[in-house]
Amino acid sequence: MEKEEISGYRHQALDALRKAGARVGDKVKVEREGEAVEGILMPRTQLGDPNYLVLKLASGYNIGVKVNGRAKVEVVESKARPPGAPPFAPPEEKPDLPLVEVIGTGGTIVSRVEYRTGAVYPALSTEDLYRAVPEISSIARVRARVLFSLLSENVYPPHWEKMAEAVAEALEEGAAGVIVAHGTDTMGYTAAALSFALQDLPAPVILVGSQRSSDRPSSDAALNLMAAVRAAAYGPFAEVGVAMHEWVSDEAVVIHRGTKVRKCHTSRRDAFKTVNASPLARVSDGKLTMLASEGFRPRNPTGKVRVKPRFDPKVALVKFHPGFNPEVIDWYVDRKYRGIILEGTGLGHVARLCYSHLRRALDEGLFVGMTSQCLWGEVRMTVYEVGRELSALGVVPLGDMLPETALVKAMWAFGQVSEKEEVQRLMLTNLAGELSSRILL
């Protein structure tokens, strides 16, 4: 028997498996102390108690079963397929359905559990995801390819540029919509980046992720992906959106506008929320319903996307806080940064100790924009004296733009133009729904 067939098992557990002739993937029955339990033998961590077998129950949950010299292991079914495991061949495509391209960049939605340590690692191919969710074959024809295999904290502006070019290529080759599979932690940044880099979109571009990997029974990957495919294939809008669970249960998926979405929870399946606006759409029971009745760019099958993918990373996002050392601002000036986005308090304030440092930054030609640390509402720098003083220095209020969206937009603006005045004009122009004409109460 090859070592990898029972990899991870040692001592009495390994002895019991060898005696039964069991391999990972077999359905086994373990009898001990008058009790019996059946499940599929899974790989296991090598870091825990070695005398436990890991079984996947019919419910989809994994349990540990301790074995000793009196425990008996019996193979019930050889090489059974674990619940939720992908079929060996992809489902047959239906030629009359629209074509959706899935571009894999990494993240939990294309991840698996690494059983040696229990950690999550990126899967090799987005095709694995397609095979794991055969239901999408009844929604659209899916063409999958891997662009990157990165955890989202490793996604930087140069990756945004390549994503934008890959999306444009897919649309030019006839895709009815494009999906970008992405890690959730920085998905909001990438969604904003693509919103600015992809101009005059003819069809939806949907970023999708999951909070829990697809081999966990509580995974949100399948429902999110099915909703993303439906939105990409049939959505009447032509914008960048983010498809994630609306609630913790499997009731609906919401399509958030790419410039108005923030991850608000570390682990819940409904971690993403639209801020200061309504979501674009909801997908529930196999139907897509628009939530934004107006103000969205309509799908245009005859249109042609314009790609403006350049980003200048020399822009900083600086969060003010009590005790903030304003010399941080000088650090960015000394290193020839071109812009600073301030995340101020309330209506857009920082301490007066910052004034001289901000004046230096502005005199050196940096663009300095003000956003708020508050999730809801907008910057209003005319209400209090400190706001008026900052405006007089040249700090530009950025309305209700999310700080991360403002950062990405400033990077993009400096990638398009070099003059500070032109950057300011772009920052104050509503290009992709990032600035609201009215604020939701």
Image (cartoon, helix red, strand yellow):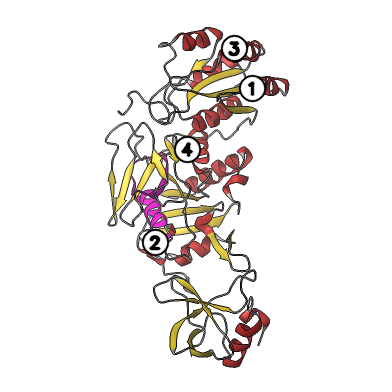
Q: CA separation, marks 2 and 1?
A: 52 Å
Identify the residue shown where x is 46% and y is 73%. 87
Eyeballing the image, is 403 above or below 64?
Answer: above
Q: Point out residue 154 in the picture as x, y percentages from the top left corner.
A: 62, 46
Q: Which mark is residue 136?
A: 2
Under mark 2, the amino acid is Ile
Disc 3 crowd rating (10 Å Cα; few below 14, some 14-19, many 20+) is some
Segment colored magenta: 222-246
Of the residues tagged 3 and 1, which is closer to the observer? 1
Q: Point out residue 420 in the picture as x, y percentages from the top left corner.
A: 59, 16
Of the residues tagged 2 and 3, which is closer to the observer? 3
Q: Which residue is mark 3?
A: 355
Under mark 4, the amino acid is Val
Q: Earlier in the sequence, mark 1 or mark 4?
A: 4
Q: CA separation, marks 4 and 3?
A: 42 Å
Quarter of the view holding residue 255: top left
Q: Which residue is mark 4?
A: 305
Identify the residue shown where x is 60% and y is 33%. 310
Eyeballing the image, is 242 above or below 77?
Answer: above
Q: Which residue is mark 1?
A: 325
Of the residues tagged 4 and 3, which is closer to the observer? 3
Identify the residue shown where x is 52% and y is 38%. 189
Q: CA separation, marks 2 and 3?
A: 55 Å
Q: Is residue 335 left or right of residue 310?
A: right
Q: Earlier in the sequence, mark 2 or mark 1?
A: 2
Q: Point out residue 270 in the picture as x, y percentages from the top left corner.
A: 39, 49
